[in-house]
Image: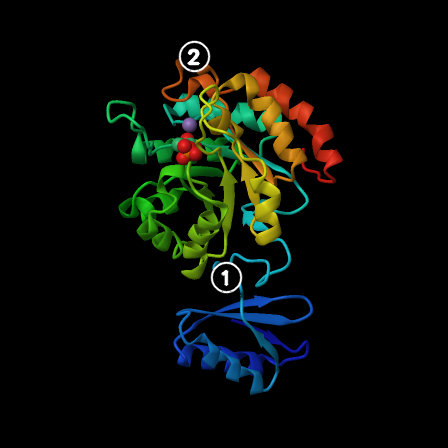
Amino acid sequence: MIIVMRSHASETEIKEVIKKIEKMHYKPHVIKGIERTVIGAIGDERGKERLQSLESMPGVEKVMPILQPYKLASREFKPENSKIKVRNVSIGGKEVVVIAGPCSVESKEQMIESARIVKKAGAKILRGGAFKPRTSPYSFQGLEEEGLKMLALAREKTGLPFVTEVMDTVDVDMVADYADILQVGARNIQNFSLLKKLGKVKKPILLKRGMMTTLIEFLMSAEYILSEGNPNVILCERGIRTFETETRNTLDLSAIPVIKSKSHLPVIVDPSHAIGHWQFVSAMSKAAIAAGADGLLIEVHPRPEEAFSDGAQSLKPERFAKLMKELKPFVIASNRSGL
Ligand code: PEP
Ligand code: MN
């Protein structure tokens, strides 16, 4: 349920409503708008009609049900776009944000070199995987904490915040100690214990759509994080599996406007994992911006031919720099800025 407070409701009235929601064993989620405060009462769907009685409390304008199965992620609950702050960067505002870097963290030198390359070309956030979800147990699995230290060093040298994947609940606290954004990979989209744990973390979460996840399931996974108290979720479309074999996945660009109509959360696109071949990353990046994406997640490697993982889809430094220049007119045409 959404409890809409009157525009001049006092702090005491708001507090009383929060107390009452808790007493009824629901969790209050408060959004303080410029005009008025709105409180979401989230919990057991059975018997939620009881909350209707809050309408008689002082300061309450009306109580309305949220019709969608995702509640806190919905535009019904929060009509205006969410902006997620990551150090000095904001995702979901007017500015398009590019996140770039290698698939895997391989060494100190590789990470610092990568960070310098992507920063020079205009990326605002660095990526690099220290825990790698690989199809084969014999493939490179990542440098784990050593890798996190290398990412932190690259941040220190360049000032770029970084995003890195966390695969397991046992590593969440450690990864959160280092990273600016924690990534949930496509394969973990419905790992509900991981999502719940990430809901308790104080850092933003980059949630990747699974390769066979519907948009409603995607938003329900985001809801797991939001409902545990972490409002900072960035959604990432990274391609879904279809019958097509010429591309690694099929980039579902329709996800961008559809999610944006349903949810206030920012949506970014990962063209690298979607298409799987560096040659097509540029076209799909432009298409994503044109379709309204709030940002891009692009794999860039100083020497893709030497990459420990995903070399075939990684851009060389000069190709990334060229793409960043070519993206500008698309950003402007979409009435955005930032590049
Ligand atoms: C990645 O970003 O390196 C990754 C493994 O992506 P995904 O989970 O989308 O496959
Ligand atoms: Mn990768």
Under circle 1, the secondary element is loop
* Crowd band around label 2 with a 10 angstrom C-alpha radius: few (<14), some (14–19), many (20+): few
Cα distance, mark 1 to mark 2? 45 Å
Q: Is residue 179 above or below residue 317?
A: below
Instruction: Indicate which disc, 1 or 2, sits on the residue closer to the N terminus.
Output: 1
Under circle 2, the secondary element is helix
Q: Position of residue 3 (x, y in %)?
A: 56, 74
Q: Position of residue 107 (x, y in %)?
A: 37, 23
Q: Quadrant of ligand 1?
A: top left
Q: Is residue 223 above or below residue 285?
A: below
Residue at the disc numbered 1: 71
Residue at the disc numbered 2: 305
Q: Residue at x 36, y 20 (%)?
A: 308
Q: Residue at x 46, y 28 (%)?
A: 249
- Mark 1: amino acid: Lys
- Mark 2: amino acid: Glu
Display coloring:
rainbow
Q: Position of residue 79 (x, y in %)?
A: 63, 59
* Crowd band around label 1 with a 10 angstrom C-alpha radius: few (<14), some (14–19), many (20+): many
The answer to whether the residue bearing label 2 lies less than 8 angstroms from the nearest atom of ligand 2 is no
Q: Is residue 66 above or below residue 75?
A: below
